[in-house]
Amino acid sequence: MKKILVTRKLLQSNEDRLKTLYDIRLNSNDELYSQKKLIELSKDCDGILSALTDKLDADTIDKLPKSVKILSNFAVGFGNIDLEAANKRNIAVTNTPEVLTDATAEIGILLILGACRRAAEGIKSAQASDWKWSADYLIGKQLTGTRLGILGMGRIGKKISKIAKSLGMVIHYHNRSKLSPEKEDGAIYHKKLASLLSVSDVLSVCCPASKETVNIINKETLEYLPKGAVVTNVARGDIVDDEALIDALDRRKVYAVGLDVYKGEPILNPGYLKHKSAFILPHLGSATKETRTAMANLAIDNLEEFFKTGKCKNKVN
Ligand code: DGY
């Protein structure tokens, strides 16, 4: 029986399934393993079912036991894993696409609505009973007719644009390549990021974190946005230079932000906390029972496929 290290606690039904398939090393206290501990615990394991909280950098991957042949990441994003290092060690890396598209897109829309309609301020005032209705109370930005810029029109970007369109937003996007008219579904392509940003009344960051996208929302690129734009991020914190975004909020270049993901999670840059207009969530993108169950099942399917065939359709390296 193959031996698998499962680095984070999963939902019960997923752990039950794993028990029937593998000799598993579970993390019943859901402790955040240090890199050292993760290496120790993976002794004799054939694979690791990892999570986005595991920093599988080059040094950690180098030190993994020779027996480890697969890192099945319980996430669509795999920015936590150094793919080059995994390639050097001939370790397969897999992810969980598709099953979390809808849940993550829902949070993407919540970020847009929350930031535009001043939900953070509204919640605080309602909780403190510190408000009175008036014609100009907490006036926000209406979405109808505004331009939504999607940075990264993959599955999640497409789903966000579909919902946003139904709210009356006009969709623009930037990708490495233009989509077919059918996939674009009326969205307007921008070959250059600067061009997309210049028409983004609201920006939704949906692209994967990679060497090319780290900090692409920065001091220079933020300047392309229209004054008073709204910036939202449902993808990865690494894509945004926090200091630059906070400075843009300070200067009112950016009206509000809606964030679900952060550099160095779970610690947030304190600059966000002082802004009333920051609508912030604790990485809830895929957090529904259906989706988390499906993600873990897919991570298990990936292990199964890999051990049976030596290949996996969700291999990313
Ligand atoms: C992912 O799968 O990358 C999501 O961010 C998890 O919530």
Image (cartoon, rainbow, N blue to C red):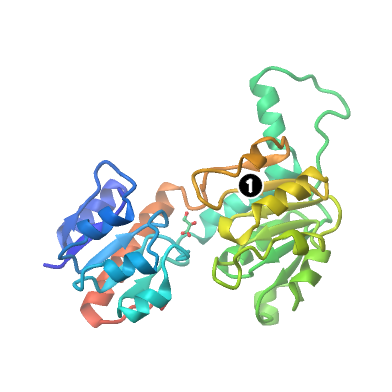
- At label 1, counting other C-alpha atoms closer than 10 Å, the crowd grade (few under 14, some 14-19, many 20 or more) is many
Left or right, 7 with reference to 186: left
**Residue found 66% across the figure and 57% down from its top:** 163
Residue 235: image location, x then y, percent? 57, 59
The answer to whether 266 is drawn above or below residue 157 in the figure is above
The answer to whether 141 is drawn above or below residue 202 in the figure is above
Q: Nearer the viewer, residue 301 or 185?
A: 301
Mark 1 lies on a secondary structure that is helix
Where is mark 1, residue-wise? Answer: 110
Q: Quadrant of residue 2?
A: bottom left
Left or right, 71 with reference to 220: left
Left or right, 98 with reference to 243: left
Q: Quadrant of the C terminus?
A: bottom left
Q: Nearer the viewer, residue 214 or 94?
A: 214
**Residue found 70% across the figure and 24% down from its top:** 125
The answer to whether 37 is drawn above or below residue 308 in the figure is above
Residue 240: image location, x then y, percent? 64, 58
**Residue found 63% across the figure and 66% down from its top:** 158
- Answer whether residue 235 is visible to the viewer in this image: no
Residue 81: image location, x then y, percent? 41, 66
